[in-house]
Amino acid sequence: MTSKNIAILGGGNLGSSIAKGLVKSGLMTPQQITITNLDLELIQHLHDEDGFNITTDNISAINGAQIVIIAVKPTAARALLNQVKDALGNGEHVVISVISGIKIHDLEEILGDMPIIRAMPNTAIAIQESMTALSFNEKGLTYKQEVSEIFNQLGSTMVIPEAQMPAATVLASCGIAFALRFLRAASQGGIEIGFSSKLSLEIAAQIMKGASKLIIENNSHPEPEIDKVTTPLGVTIKSLNKMEYEGFSSSLIQGVVAGYNKILETES
Ligand SMILES: NC(=O)C1=CN([C@@H]2O[C@H](COP(=O)(O)OP(=O)(O)OC[C@H]3O[C@@H](n4cnc5c(N)ncnc54)[C@H](OP(=O)(O)O)[C@@H]3O)[C@@H](O)[C@H]2O)C=CC1
Ligand SMILES: O=C(O)[C@@H]1CCC=N1
């Protein structure tokens, strides 16, 4: 349990997921977390259902917190940063930015020389299953252990050079959407071969969980695990070869690279 308070500026998809993960992990109570949004109605449910403090006032949220997570869309970032920079300048705050495509150097240009950490989680942070990348500026390094410990409670964490942040954004953050698209496609195939939509999705989700656990818990690689499934003259290899003929692996790889090229356009 941490005694610090957190302000999450921009309570949307990711900001609210982080807040929920922090409470689920037992690290914080909802009363220690203040979530902001320009439209209070959008986050009212986070107060009513989960007990978080909510406000439209970014400055008052910052004043009541020691850790400030900035979670607005990249297009809204500069306006927000300029609005809050004076409130962050008193030496009492650590900033954690989850904004994609905005580098520490750009954040420092607006906020000045203060502890700044870039974090790149994914939405599974809400259930403590994120893969989160962290990069620190020099002053942020003072908080490396503390911040790493927080994100370790919310899934797995990797500390990386900032130059790898675009790659982490695609594979670790967007990646959850890629995995979910696999899951959806698998369940659609399941419906075509006779399962109800509900059961098909349940099967697809469980195979994905099982596959992930085989790799994580056995410290294994997919190929030997696949070899264990592919009976000679059997069904699995027939399906896999058809999938590969249709471009399965290649389309995933090209999708990852396309996302990477897209983010390099902004973060260079
Ligand atoms: N979603 C994800 O899985 C991930 C997102 N990210 C990054 O995290 C950031 C947030 O993404 P996401 O949660 O999806 O975005 P959302 O749009 O869902 O959430 C941001 C919220 O902040 C609000 N907002 C805008 N300006 C302000 C302001 N000045 N003060 C308070 N609130 C404001 C937005 O309102 P409005 O819509 O009206 O502008 C919106 O409701 C992005 O930079 C994204 O790149 C990183 C990793 C994963
Ligand atoms: O799609 C996006 O741009 C953001 C960055 C990582 C996940 N979502």
Image (spheres, helix red, strand yellow):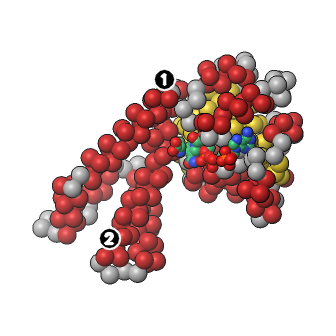
Q: Which residue is mark 2?
A: 189
Image: 71 above or below 196? above
Q: Position of residue 44 (x, y in %)?
A: 78, 59
Q: Position of residue 33 (x, y in %)?
A: 79, 48
Classify mark 2: residues with Cα within 10 Å, few (<14), some (14-19) or many (20+): some
Is tag 2's residue or tag 1's residue first in the polypeptide sequence?
2
Q: Is residue 175 visible?
A: yes
- Counting the numbered discs, the total is 2
User: Circle 2 sits in a helix, a strand or a loop, which is it?
Assistant: helix
Which label number is shown at residue 61? Answer: none
* The quarter of the displayed image where residue 111 is located: top right
Q: Is residue 148 visible?
A: no
- Amino acid type for the residue under numbered disc 1: Ser
Q: Going 29% across and 48% down the picture, which residue do you hit?
A: 251
- Amino acid type for the residue under numbered disc 2: Gly
Cα distance in 3D space between marks 2 and 1: 40 Å
